[in-house]
Amino acid sequence: MPDPVRVGVVGCGAISGQYLKNLTASPAVRIVALADLVQERCEARAGEFGLAGVRICTTAQLMADPSVELVLNLTWPGAHVAVSMQALAAGKHVYSEKPLAPMLAEGKQLLSRAESSGLLFGCAPDTILGSGIQIARKIIDDGRIGRPIGFSAFMMHRGVESWHPNPPFYYEPGGGPMLDMGPYYLAALMCILGPIRRVSGFAAIAIPQRLVTHKDADGVPGPMHGRQIAVSTPDHVCGVMEFASGAVGTIVTSFATHFPSYDPQQPITIYGTEGTLRVPDPNRFDGPVHIRREGEEDFHPAAEPFALGHGRGIGVLDMCDAIRAATQRLGDTASRHSGIRCSAAQACAALEAMQGFLDSSESGRAIAMQLPYSRPAPMPLKPCRL
């Protein structure tokens, strides 16, 4: 077995627990360093996951550490670009939480730096590698609903200020429902349907002021409880997408709605010339996939339900396999990038579409996609574990 890839984690907040739970269970990874603005968070994570001897340090110290091969960037969205650029400048491979960047121009700069440095760059979400999206993709590829002609995708709720302890960044540029949740939906749709040709959109700030009402599990008001937040990015976005395949459909992401009527377990529906497919929540790895074809009386499971056993971090492990894979198998840097199922190039293509919705809303014109996109290789559809 190849030596484990040595990983340094920057950002030990809430999402880091899910990553560390799965990565520390894999022999393909060794966590060697933890960094955070608050050192106590690193110490807590090290104790929680039995990381005895792990280096707890500043971000600068982690970047300078020659033992770190891959930087796992789990910082808040506003720091993603700076931390990823630091890691690339230090000669480290990078895997970033979503979104890749708040603006497309910054995402392109990151890709350019990685490519010129010969470094691998991955980006969440990796939920597309779970059984839900992978089964849906196979059903489409097998032609079981004919040629896809349309789709709808919904992510609608009231916002995060009632449950998140630090919600302001969700309502600032680079946040909002499209940049926060859109990556899951765009990655899933692109994985299933392929590249997007053009988008158009309408966006609004529906609720200009937000009141933070978060309390902890014991009912104690959080540190921002009672604070008013001024919303400075659209909190309700409606988009139309045309795929290169000819499929045309809609996506709605909202932090401003009550009681949506769609099934939250299956928020994506794909319509084909011979049937319809209901796709599970792209923010989860597994979930029900249902199909109804001409002549059938109702929807029914499209495949025997099972879980691949994946969780957040499977995209990192897939990238570690690419780092360790034999040169003769993966070839040059470009080939290695294509071998990463959750690549930064894919995330940047999704970012182009997400920014396109907002730009279209301002300009009143459809926005053509310019970045290339190729669907990643499918995952083996058999039960397995991290």
Image (cartoon, rainbow, N blue to C red):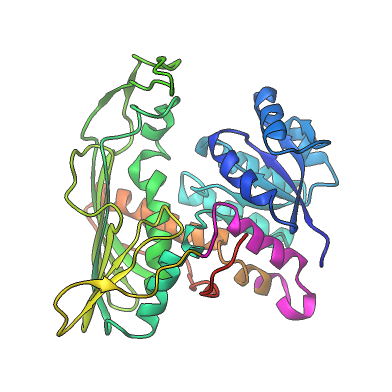
Residue 2 relative to residue 270: left or right? right
Q: Count up the numbered dots.
A: 0
Residue 52 relative to residue 353: left or right? right
Q: Residue at x 37, y 68 (%)?
A: 196
Q: Quadrant of residue 338?
A: bottom right
Decide whether the magenta segment is chiefly helix, strand or loop: helix
Residue 158 relative to residue 371: left or right? left
360 shown above or below 225? below
Q: Which residues are magenta?
A: 308-334
Front position in the image: 377 or 116: 377
- Membership of 319 in magenta stretch: yes
Image coords of residue 19 (percent x, y): 60, 46
Residue 326 relative to residue 266: left or right? right
Residue 46 shows up from this direction: yes
Image coords of residue 384 (percent x, y): 58, 67
Front position in the image: 374 or 117: 374
Q: Residue at x 33, y 20 (%)?
A: 213
Image coords of residue 286 (percent x, y): 43, 60
Q: Quadrant of the N terminus?
A: bottom right
Image coords of residue 57 (percent x, y): 77, 30
- Membership of 375 in magenta stretch: no
80 shown above or below 312? above
Q: Residue at x 36, y 79 (%)?
A: 139
Residue 272 shows up from this direction: no
Q: Residue at x 48, y 70 (%)?
A: 372
